[in-house]
Image (cartoon, helix red, strand yellow):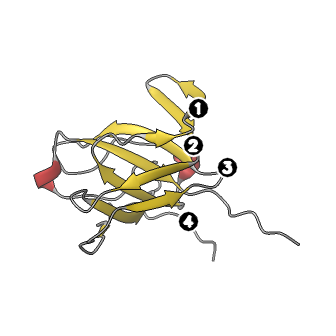
Amino acid sequence: MTERAPNRPGKAEPWPARQRKLTMQLHPSDRIFFRSVNARGIPAGVGAGNAGKACTVIIGHKQIEGLEKVRSFRDLEEFSGSSVEIFPEDLAFSCLVDSVGAPYSVGIPNKGKDVTIIVHGEEETEE
């Protein structure tokens, strides 16, 4: 049986409370999307091509170091970058992208809010 992304929306795992600012170093294969959360608490899609990939969802549009536009298609703009700072007051979630290309729900209380979505690409290993 093959592994595939789930059809039903899952629930994102919230990050534990942090006491300090974190700097997430991004891989060149990571892709960044600036989207919003719908009335059901689900962030707008990031493309079905990302189905099954791990992602980080941060409430609010974050400043990304080294931000570069990779491509755009219809209303979807895809970026890459080198790092993002996550502050103690930021709400952050870890989840997967479902089969239709949307990250899991971040909760109805976050409806209408802007989000930064980082879809984690394949890690490059040195041999």
Q: Give the image location of residue 24, x and y in percent.
A: 49, 59
- State the SS at label 1: strand
Image disc number at residue 4: 4
Q: Check disc 2 and report the residue beneath it.
A: 81
| Amino acid bearing label 3 | Pro
Mark before the other along the chain sequence, 1 or 4: 4
Q: Is residue 111 left or right of residue 29?
A: left
Mark before the other along the chain sequence, 3 or 1: 3
Mark before the other along the chain sequence, 4 or 2: 4
Mark before the other along the chain sequence, 3 or 4: 4
Residue found at the far top of this picture: 74
| Amino acid bearing label 4 | Arg
- State the SS at label 2: loop
Label pair 3/1, CB-CB below 8 angstroms: no
Q: Nearer the viewer, mark 4 or mark 2?
A: 2
Q: Is residue 85 left or right of residue 115?
A: right
| Amino acid bearing label 1 | Glu
Label pair 2/1, CB-CB below 8 angstroms: yes
Image disc number at residue 28: 3
Distance from disc 3 to disc 4, alpha carbons, whole Å, reads 24 Å
Label pair 4/2, CB-CB below 8 angstroms: no
Residue found at x 63% / y 72% = 2
Distance from disc 1 to disc 4, alpha carbons, whole Å, reads 30 Å
Distance from disc 2 to disc 3, alpha carbons, whole Å, reads 7 Å
Q: Check disc 1 and report the residue beneath it.
A: 68
Distance from disc 4 to disc 2, alpha carbons, whole Å, reads 27 Å
Using the image as rendered, state which of residue 27 and residue 23 is in the foreground. 23
Image quadrant holding the N terminus, namely bottom right
Residue found at x 26% / y 72% = 19
- State the SS at label 4: loop
